Image (tube, grey):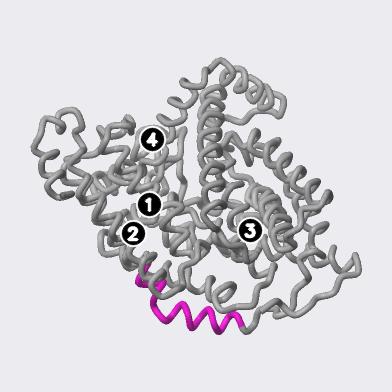
Amino acid sequence: IIVAALALILNSDLTSYFPYIYLLPWILALLLVFATPTLFLYSRGRLKFYDPLVYATWSYFFPAFVIGGFMLAGGWSQPYYLSFIQDAATNLPYTIVLIMLGFAGMSLGYFSSLGVKLGATASRFLPSRDFEPSALLTAGVVLLLLGAFNFMVAVAIGVSGYQHLEIVESYSGLVFLTTLFWMQGSFIIWYVLFSRGDFSFKSLLMVGLLFAATIVRALFSGNRSALFLVFVIVILAFVLSGGKLNFQKTAIAGICLSVCLMAGMIYGTTFRSVKGTESYSSVGEYTDNIYETFDEVGRFDLQSSVQFALAGLAERLDTLSSVAVVVSSYEQLQPYEESYGLDNNIWKDISTFFVPRILWNEKPVASEPRKYSDLYFNYGDNSFAITPVGDLLRNYGPIGVPIGMFLFGIVLRFIYRALIENQPRSISRATMYFMLLLSISYEGFYGVLIPFMFKVGFTAVIGLLIVGLIARGMGHRRVPAQA
């Protein structure tokens, strides 16, 4: 029935109204490839939402390429750079094939025995004792407040928020990394609350503090995904603490996710329109932009707000078209990459990330999103998605896509086996795993995946040391991790 329906559609007049409707069979094939590892894990009784392969599939690859692909095929997503795709009838399906190869390579690397063996070996050297969850509530609050303070400092100096420094200072990266204490502290608090299972008056105060910090951060970040990030923190804290998602909880989570996506899309898109560019603004000017954004949003009626959010969400989810720009243009633009500092960026970033910028102030930034956007999209004031697949293609050609993703699949299984899989339940291991999992951006460059994971992991260790010092100072002692 599906094949017959597709044949009728592709041979009807609909192709004149929907020029990319021929992508439907390819998108369905892509969905099958994405679903295969999840179905395999389910058949083996090993399906967990926080499994890194499952999380990557359903939090990024499925929305970005399947839902986003349907948005493109249905005409809801019509970005200006569609005209940059040369021979779209060939390059869009070819892009889907490359994504299939990349995802299949990552899955094979994940299921290979190498990551399992390396992770099992590393787990033996990790601490086997941990503080009781209830002993870490105060420490989590301190870490949250420290991260919130650092975030406001980062906004004030132009490191965070919807602004961009033209000159990268030696301390910029360090300041940005300390803002992640907010995320780490939030996870610890939610983990403790879910582990205890009783929401007393003190617990309600903690929840109120979390929401207050969340709203302030979302307003100043100017980011369309800020509220979605909060949703992910809560869900991961719930399942990693041992919580089970039944039908009722899943339905509530779905409603909350929809609200976060719609509200974040409306506010983030309007804020960026109000501010105009990513140029640096003082705290006063930045705050004025927030007030003006609320004024703009307040002029919308409900129907206009929903339509505005859905239109923005459609283009935001459509990552297929932006990767197709790279696929169709990388060979012609390769001679110009050196002048933009983008040539051989994977090797440059991986081979130099261990040297802190504070010691090497002139260290090159090879994977520079705005230079990439300027070259490939003729617009350097925004960061367009490239994905690890597109980055591997630029650097090593089609053969590099499955090989590079295979290696990263091994890394995913390594951290999962070392910290979570077949390990005792430990808040410190869960927190470290959570921070590493959320450090992975499947929308950005392949060359920064490992360097950024290393930096976030180091920051998370510092955060855990701060939490441990506070817990010991309050008289708490470590106990064996819960089996």
Q: Earlier in the sequence, mark 1 or mark 4?
A: 1
Does the stretch in magenta take in 108?
yes
The reply to whether dot 4 and dot 3 touch (C-beta < 8 Å) is no
Residue 112 sits in which quadrant? bottom left
Q: Dot 1 corresponds to which residue?
A: 62
Quadrant occupied by the C terminus: bottom right
Q: Of the residues under marks 4 and 3, which one precedes in the sequence? A: 3
User: Percent x, y for residue 425?
Assistant: 65, 73
252 sits to left or right of 199 = left
Q: Which residue is mark 4?
A: 315
For the magenta stretch, what is the residue range?
A: 107-123
Say which residue appears at 67% left-offset and 62% top-offset. Answer: 460
Give x and y (percent) for residue 79. Answer: 33, 32
The residue furthest front is: 248
The span from disc 2 to disc 1 (Cα, nearest Å) is 7 Å
- Measured in 3D between alpha carbons, the distance from the residue under mark 4 to the one under mark 2, in whole angstroms, is 21 Å
Q: Which residue is mark 3?
A: 237
Q: Which mark is residue 34?
A: 2
